[in-house]
Image (cartoon, coloured by chain):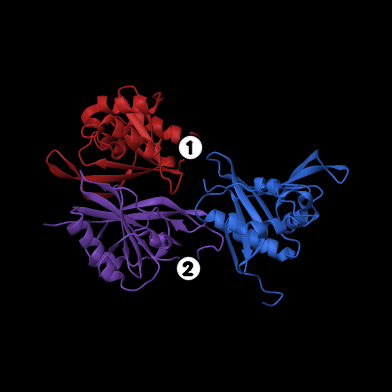
Amino acid sequence: MTEILRLDVEAAVSELRASGDSARGFLGLDPVTQNDSLLAAELQAVAAQLFSAGEALVGFAPNTDQPRQAYVASTSADPEPLRALLEFLTTYQRCTTFVAVVPADAEGGKAFEACGFERAGVLPQHRWQNYDWQDVLVYVGRADSCRS
Amino acid sequence: MRLRGYRRGDAHLLAGPWLPGELLGLPMIDWPMLAEPTTVPAPTDPSQELCIASGLGFVRYTELDWVHRRARVEIGLHALHSLDVLLKTVVAHGFLTLNLSRLYGWVTPVLDPPTGLLGDVGFQREATLPESAWLDGRPVDREIWGVVRND
Amino acid sequence: MTTTELPHWSSRPYSDADRDAVLALFTEADFFFRTGDPDTRPEWEILELLDEDTHVLLADGEVVGLYAVESEANNACHYSMQLRLRASAPLRWWLAAFEELVRANRWRREVVRLALRFDEFDDRGLAFARAAGLRAEGTLAAVTVHDGSRYGYVSFARIWEPIS
């Protein structure tokens, strides 16, 4: 199981920035267009927590309407860091379901499919990036089928 | 129907027996007597657009994003008439006054909201998320409905 | 209202507007809401007992009691409740108000465990807890002095199995 290391807000912001393109759309953020203080404010507004897992960055934000569900994100197509995050959330936060909201061509999207997430829908033209509208995919995973 | 600007005296319209964040916040008749009503904060800065529909309730455009030109819409109703006209006005205000290109919101199927009226003004069901809200001792599913401006 | 009907319940967070009604509740010798000798407490002390979680309970619009619900542990969905109705309220009012409070608390958040605790000398409170079918969990002995004798603190709880 990959080790994940919790990052405080400052470290999270600098990791997001260092991840460049692969972090665009991460928990709804965009380190390419948003500056550090805005990223920090947004992370705190949704009570997000980010973790570094080797080369990848993973993170979650709780669903305040249903604390046993978490929004999750990853910068890497490798499912292992994501699995480690899901294991953490299931064990320590009593999470039973996970939601990922991912731009259509993002790296992180492949990790969700590899982890057994199911496609729950598409939000058309939900983002503007690279001079064009992008669709955003919504994936849902369950704790009992998405860990290792 | 025209929406009008919020005034301090409208504060009582911001609380009611709705599920928080609901796009079509119709009053829930079995709201427990001793449960706090859901309350929406009054608008105090540009991050929210909240308007009043006279005699009906409020409309709130939240999570406003001017890069992606979208907003999540919440409607809190105290009366149940003219919902079709209100929805047309909500979409028009979002697209034509705020110049957004997309509106979306949460719909909770177990509450049996009138989603046909959403369809009439261009909304479509875009995603179904299991166990996304808590209601009366159990988690319930939620859907995202959205409309994209087409011009 | 006939004697067998239950009142319409409502509540609001405690505020100055309710001060006189609430001070009147504490004139009853057994209004044991966060205190063991309510009827001798001065006004400042009573107001200190009322924190931001405290709500006034109204039956048909009249103040009949107080309640407060607090979280006992982060994320664990454990809560504790203090509920007290005035002496003129019959036991079935306590039971009805309690069930309404339980429903209201489970309406928008998960509750796995709800604990209520009463002093051993609190006859009315203990009678309510037993009539409500709460699980008696034990007594912490000799923690308080009342009327010259030592008494313990009795714990009750209702538990809902988590959905997973």
The answer to whether tags 1 and 2 share a subunit is: no
Closest to the observer, B77 or A97: B77
Q: Label 1 to label 2, Cα distance in Å? A: 33 Å
**Quick check: B83 left or right of C44?**
left
Image quarter of residue A40:
top left
- Looking at the picture, which amino acid does disc 2 mark? Ile
- Among the chains, which one is red? A
Q: Which chain is blue?
A: C
Rendering coords of residue B58 (x, y %)? 35, 62
Q: Position of residue C142 (x, y in %)?
A: 82, 38
Q: Is residue C65 visible?
A: no
Quarter holding the N terminus of chain A is top left
How far across and down, in percent of the image, does residue C152 sit?
80, 42
Chain name for mark 2: B
Q: Count residues near mark 2 (Cα–Cα under 10 Å), then give few for <14, some for 14-19, many for 20+.
A: few
Q: State the count of labels.
A: 2
Task: Work out whether B37 lies above or below C142.
Answer: below
Q: Colour of chain B?
A: purple
Residue under label 1: A93
Q: Are marks 1 and 2 in contact (CB under 8 Å)?
A: no
Q: Which mark is residue B29?
A: 2
**Residue drawn at the location 43% of the way across and 40% of the way down:** A143
